[in-house]
Amino acid sequence: MWAMLVGLFPSTVWAAPQGIAQAVGLGSPGHAFQLVPFLVGLIAHMMNSVGFGIIFIATARATHLRGAGLIIAGMLWGLIVYAAMYWVLLRGLLASTATSFLSANPERSWILGHLMFGLILGTLVGYGRFRQPKPARRGGRPLPN
């Protein structure tokens, strides 16, 4: 959502999600609105986010992270995802087809957006809906944190 809001100012709201599909060869380059690349880009981005979120949750639970450590780990995870997607995938493997996506928003917005993704992810895992239940001990009482 952050990237789409930022897109209102330097380009257009549809440029970033549409650029995702254009990077893999769907649609023509540029920021002129194209319905199919826009929808495919939205879906692909959301599915990537879900997948990266699941990986983070599994890792956080396996390492028994709790509290503020989860939030910090989430933000670091956001930066790792950014580095992998931006530098390895878009600037590396898809460099010849990712021009529309890379020009959709300023790079600092991608960094901030991924930090926000990690912050929210870490907070949800540590304190919200995806919080790991406390392990029970004998008598069914939960163990203190």
Image: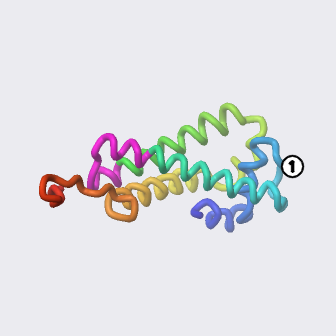
Residue 143 as seen in the image, left or right of residue 97: left
Q: Badge 1, how many Cα within 10 Å: few under 14, some, many 20+?
A: some
Q: How is the image coloured?
A: rainbow
Residue 84 locus on image (x, y percent): 55, 38
List the single residue furthest toward the front. Answer: 139
Q: Is residue 99 left or right of residue 66?
A: right
Q: Residue at x 85, y 50 (%)?
A: 27
User: Does the magenta portion include 11?
Assistant: no
Q: Nearer the viewer, residue 132 or 115?
A: 132
Q: Quadrant of residue 134?
A: bottom left
Q: Which residues are magenta?
A: 56-72
What residue lies at 72% left-to-right and 54% top-to-bottom?
A: 41
Compared across the picture, whether 51 is left or right of 19 comes to left
In reply to whether residue 63 is colored magenta, the answer given is yes
Q: Residue furthest left?
A: 139
Foreground of the two, 38 or 61:
61
Q: Main secondary structure of the magenta part?
A: helix
Q: Position of residue 100 (x, y in %)?
A: 76, 49
Q: Is residue 43 left or right of residue 119?
A: right
Rendered position, 124 above or below 101? below
| Residue most extreme to the top | 93
Q: Amino acid at mark 1?
A: Ser
Residue 94 lies, in percent from the top left, at 72, 36
Q: Nearer the viewer, residue 73 or 132?
A: 132
Instruction: Give 104 or 133, whichever is nearer the viewer.
Output: 133
To which residue does mark 1 refer? Answer: 28
Q: Is residue 88 above or below residue 133?
A: above
Considering the numbered disc 1 on the image, is that residue within a helix, a strand or a loop?
loop
Quadrant, the N terminus: bottom right
Residue extending farthest to the right is 28
- Expressed as whole percent of the image width and height from the top left, the position of residue 6 reads 62, 64
Q: Quadrant of the C terminus?
A: bottom left
